[in-house]
Image: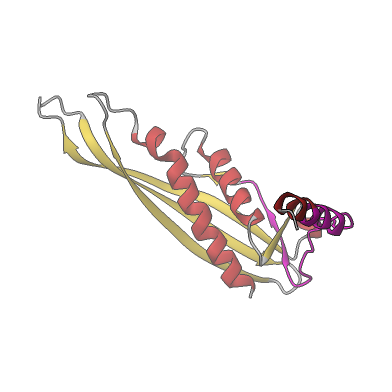
Amino acid sequence: MNPSRTLALACLLVLVGCTGYESVRVEPADRVAVALLPVRNEAYLPGFAPVVQERVREDLLRSRTVRLVTGPGEADRTLALVLTDYQEAPLSFESDDTGIPSSAETELTVRARLENPASGTTRETEVRVREPVFADSGSFVGPLDQSQSILAGRVARKVRAWVEQSVR
């Protein structure tokens, strides 16, 4: 048999075999519905709470244990996050003795609270993440500006892992 005819026949069979295929996402019935409440910012970090809120939301949407819902009324659990502390510690300084740091370590602390309204139980934990930042080309942009996205991502991963463990 001609190789091009064999290839054409194989392609035709694949196409015909896939005509009834429909991509459907099946939600496991045992996923716990969680409502993420607005993140409170007691560390007074301007514009940081929405970044953490979005990163945690994105991470929870990827969970196979948790199903994110829009409001507490439809949730099995409610998740509240509070940005409680932010610290910057200079690690090194410019050699010209200006006092401007060339590197620093940032640390963000977040309190997480998971409530089960049906049973009245509450679980709490404290999540602490660190990120070093470095100056580039002699100008040291604020450490929070440099590390904000990374800190939020690390908080999101830790919160997601804690929530998944807590609902099992």
Quarter of image, res 165: bottom right
Q: Is residue 141 above or below residue 157?
A: above
In the image, is residue 98 part of the stretch drawn in magenta? no
Tell me where the magenta segment starts and ends, as one range: 9-38
Give the camera-side residue of 160 and 121: 160
x, y percentage for residue 159?
53, 59
Left or right? Give the position of 142 relative to 59. Answer: left
Residue 151 is situated, as x and y percent measured from the top left of the image, at 43, 46
Q: Is residue 23 magenta?
A: yes
- Kindly give the residue lying farthest to the left in the view shown: 96
Out of 13 and 7, give the one closest to the viewer.
Answer: 7
Q: The N terminus appears in which quarter of the rendering?
A: bottom right
Residue 90 vertical placement versus 74 (above, below): above
In the image, 83: left or right of 114? left
Please indicate whether residue 153 sits to the left or right of residue 166 in the image. Answer: left
Query: Seen in the image, is 43 located left or right of residue 168?
Result: left
Residue drawn at point x = 63 percent, y = 49 percent? 57
Q: Residue at x 58, y 61 (%)?
A: 113
The residue at the point 53 percent across, 53 percent down is: 156
